[in-house]
Amino acid sequence: MKAKSFTIFGNPVAHSISPKMHGFAIEGLGLDATYTKTHLEGACRLRTLFLESFDAANVTVPHKEAAFGQCDEVRGIAQEIGAVNTLINENGHMIGYNTDAEGFYRSMQDFPDIKSALILGAGGTAKAISYILKEKGIEVSILNRSASRLEAFENFKTATWENFEASYHDIIINTTSAGLEEETLPAPKNIMIGLFEHTKYAIDVIYNKETPFLKMAKEYKIPTKDGADMLLYQGVLAFNLFYHDTFSFEEIVPFMQKAF
Ligand code: NDP
């Protein structure tokens, strides 16, 4: 059988650990495949490149929405989210999925009985997470710095820093990039105090770093986790799609985990 060829499209893509994660799974499961990085300045050639050269792929920033628009068919929750992070070449047809959403939901299972969630941020990641939580019956509110991106969340309760009123939520999820490069909180300190006084759990989707958000949550003795499991699980779910569910989730996890 011909060796399979996978890649990740992004800009930048050099920092991505997906090739390492998938590489460990390919090696560990004894498969004949390669997983490369493809730096794409713009997304206009994504579809052609993908269908010419790859059996399946992942897509990262900033091409997830553009890839969605180029798919022949989009399956599952990606249809609502409007962004795909996984592509499958099905007999010359580009099929798109979103495994970020389910990856996040699985990572949240460490925290039981979540009925309400407050998401900080209104970008692509907030969209994926808000749709899956809503689908699972969780009441979701969104708080964002500026109003313009909130327009995409018309079926959710939304607020900006100016009109936000603190209330109880089982979990607070930071999907902003505040804390990624600079030591900043995702909202002004007085708002953050109100949030941490009224919650049980906190998750930051940023990984491999204790952000100011996570540090402050710990000061309030709130159980926390970062985004490493979300990243791991979206990769496992994507790998499962690459191999049409040949392997179980539990079989793939230990191999991919070696990349962290
Ligand atoms: P987007 O650029 O789509 O959205 C960024 C959001 O952050 C916007 O709502 C923006 O608000 C807000 N924001 C940015 N800077 C600040 C700040 N200083 N203070 C308050 N709010 C701010 O980003 P993505 O959704 O693509 O990614 C967000 C984060 O999620 C990144 O840190 C990324 O690394 C992480 N991520 C993690 C994944 C994982 O698997 N663990 C997967 C994907 C992403 P405004 O609208 O006002 O500009």
Image (cartoon, rainbow, N blue to C red):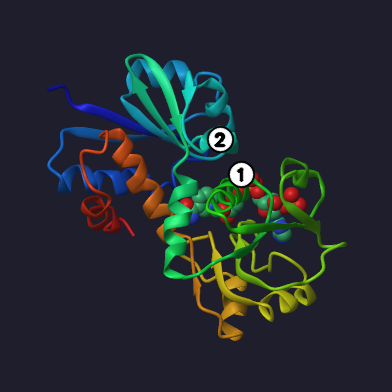
- The image's mark for residue 124 is 1
Q: Nearer the viewer, residue 52 or 174?
A: 174
Q: Does 99 sit above or below residue 86?
A: below
Local crowd at mark 2 within 10 Å, few (<14), some, or many (≥20)?
A: many
- The image's mark for residue 83 is 2
Residue at disc 1, CB closer than 8 Å to ligand 1:
yes
Quadrant including the N terminus? top left
Mark positioned earlier in the residue sequence (2 or 1) = 2
Residue 124 is situated, as x and y percent measured from the top left of the image, at: 61, 44
Q: Tag 1, which secondary structure?
A: helix
CA separation in Å, label 2 and label 1 = 8 Å
The image quadrant that residue 245 belongs to is top left
Residue positioned 42% across, 24% down in the render: 95
Q: Does 93 sit above or below residue 260?
A: above
Residue 101 is situated, as x and y percent measured from the top left of the image, at: 50, 48
The image quadrant that residue 193 belongs to is bottom right
Quadrant including the C terminus? bottom left
Local crowd at mark 1 within 10 Å, few (<14), some, or many (≥20)?
A: some
One can see residue 63 in this view: no
Residue type, label 2: Ala
Q: Nearer the viewer, residue 117 or 162?
A: 117
Residue type, label 1: Gly
One can see residue 214 in this view: yes
Taking the image as shown, residue 118 lies to the left or right of residue 31, namely right
Residue 241 is situated, as x and y percent measured from the top left of the image, at: 32, 36
Contact, CB < 8 Å: mark 2 with mark 1?
yes
Residue 90 is situated, as x and y percent measured from the top left of the image, at: 34, 20
